């Protein structure tokens, strides 16, 4: 099952040279874990709430691969280059199985809720 790393990075006036160095090195850190960018700084069309900043979304083949990437020596070596100059939030989340059905999920939740109230 795929997993995703989602970063919400706040915008800055101009990219710091260390952020550019981070960008130059990130792909080589991702490659051994089969990570690939799905979104990288595209324009954000906010429809609900507030979202000041950029979005980065990286797909991995599994939750383990995503976690291993984040903890890898290669990524930990370049992470301070970004962190020192860009404020943000980052999460790793597991995706859903192919054919995920939200209606079936709701039915399971209803059943579990009803059983808990008996």
Image (tube, rainbow, N blue to C red):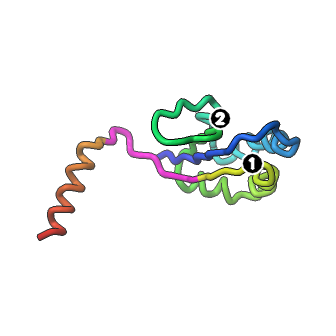
Q: Earlier in the sequence, mark 1 or mark 2?
A: 2
Q: Which mark is residue 34?
A: none
Which SS type dominates the magenta stretch? Answer: loop
Image coords of residue 67 (percent x, y): 60, 57
Question: Label 1 belongs to which residue?
Answer: 86
Task: Using the rendered image of the protein, determine whether residue 32 is visible from the camera's viewpoint.
Answer: yes
- Verify whether residue 104 appears in magenta: no
Q: Quadrant of residue 112?
A: bottom left
**Left or right, 85 with reference to 34:** right
Image coords of residue 96 (percent x, y): 40, 46
Task: Using the rendered image of the protein, determine whether residue 74 is visible from the camera's viewpoint.
Answer: no
Between residue 105 and residue 61, name the one nearer to us: 105
Helix, strand or loop under label 1:
loop
Neighbourhood count class around disc 2 (C-alpha, 10 Å): few under 14, some 14–19, many 20 upward = few
Neighbourhood count class around disc 1 (C-alpha, 10 Å): few under 14, some 14–19, many 20 upward = some
Tell me whether the residue at label 1 lies in contact with that at label 2, contact meaning CB atoms closer than 8 angstroms: no
Q: Which residues are magenta?
A: 91-100
Q: Residue at x 52, y 48 (%)?
A: 3
Question: Label 2 belongs to which residue?
Answer: 40
Q: Residue at x 68, y 44 (%)?
A: 10
């Amino acid at each position: 099952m795929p997993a995703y790393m989602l970063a919400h990075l706040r915008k800055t006036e101009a990219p710091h040279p260390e952020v550019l160095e981070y960008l130059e090195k990130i792909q080589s850190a991702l490659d051994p874990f089969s990570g690939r960018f799905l979104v990288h700084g595209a324009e954000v069309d906010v429809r609900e709430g507030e979202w000041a900043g950029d979005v980065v979304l990286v797909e991995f083949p599994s939750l383990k691969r995503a976690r291993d990437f984040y903890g890898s020596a290669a990524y930990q070596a370049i992470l301070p280059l970004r962190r020192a100059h860009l404020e943000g939030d980052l999460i790793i989340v597991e995706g859903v199985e192919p054919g995920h059905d939200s209606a079936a999920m709701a039915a399971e939740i209803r059943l579990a809720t009803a059983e808990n109230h008996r």
